[in-house]
Image (cartoon, grey):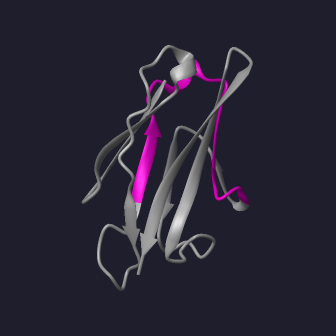
Amino acid sequence: GTVAAASPGLGMFTITFSQIADAAPSITVPTLYRASRGAPTSATLTVSDPEQYTSIAWRIDNAAMTAGTGASFTLSAANPAYNLKAWHFLTLEVVKDGVPYNKTVPFTVEY
């Protein structure tokens, strides 16, 4: 399964799960900017072929207040849970045939 994201200024990036018969991960690290700095301030990630999974969950920096479920998830530099200037980590977990697969993607927030 793959995850693709497109956002103005970010280009495309893909998350793949090598355990589910995919090639090695190919990821371009996104950088988000606080509104005072300019764009892009957000990026939306969407899971390709979500119907193959029984669940899809997202989490940032392993914090409960950043959790989300469903085929799409939006990163936002306006979110106070992770808008400090730093590296952050987005974790995606999908379940296929009763087996969980995890992928963690780093991203940065700049002022």
Q: Is residue 106 left or right of residue 42?
A: right
In which quarter of the view is residue 30 placed? Answer: bottom left
Place residue 64 in its image quadrant. bottom right
From the viewer's perspective, is residue 65 above or below residue 34? above
Horizontal side of residue 55 vs 83, given as left or right: right
Q: Which residue occupies 50% across, 13% down? A: 21
Q: In which quarter of the image is the C terminus?
A: bottom left
Q: Classify residue 84 by image quadrant.
A: bottom right
Whether residue 111 sits left or right of residue 11 in the image: it is right
Up-down: is 57 above or below 68? above
Q: Which x, y percent locates residue 4?
A: 38, 38
Which residue sits at x=74%, y=18%? 98
Q: Does the magenta stretch include residue 44?
A: yes
Residue at image position (67%, 24%) is 54
Q: How many marks?
A: 0
Whole-percent x, y for residue 78 in the image: 49, 74
Relative to 94, residue 86 above or below: below
Residue 61 lies, with reference to residue 109, above or below; the image says: above
State the residue lying farthest toward the bottom: 36
Q: What stretch is highlighted in magenta?
A: 43-63
On screen, residue 6 versus residue 46, left or right, reads left
Residue 34: % across, % down:
41, 78
**In terms of depth relative to the viewer, which is nearer, 26 or 44?**
26
**Magenta segment: does it hold 85?**
no
Closer to us: 84 or 3: 84
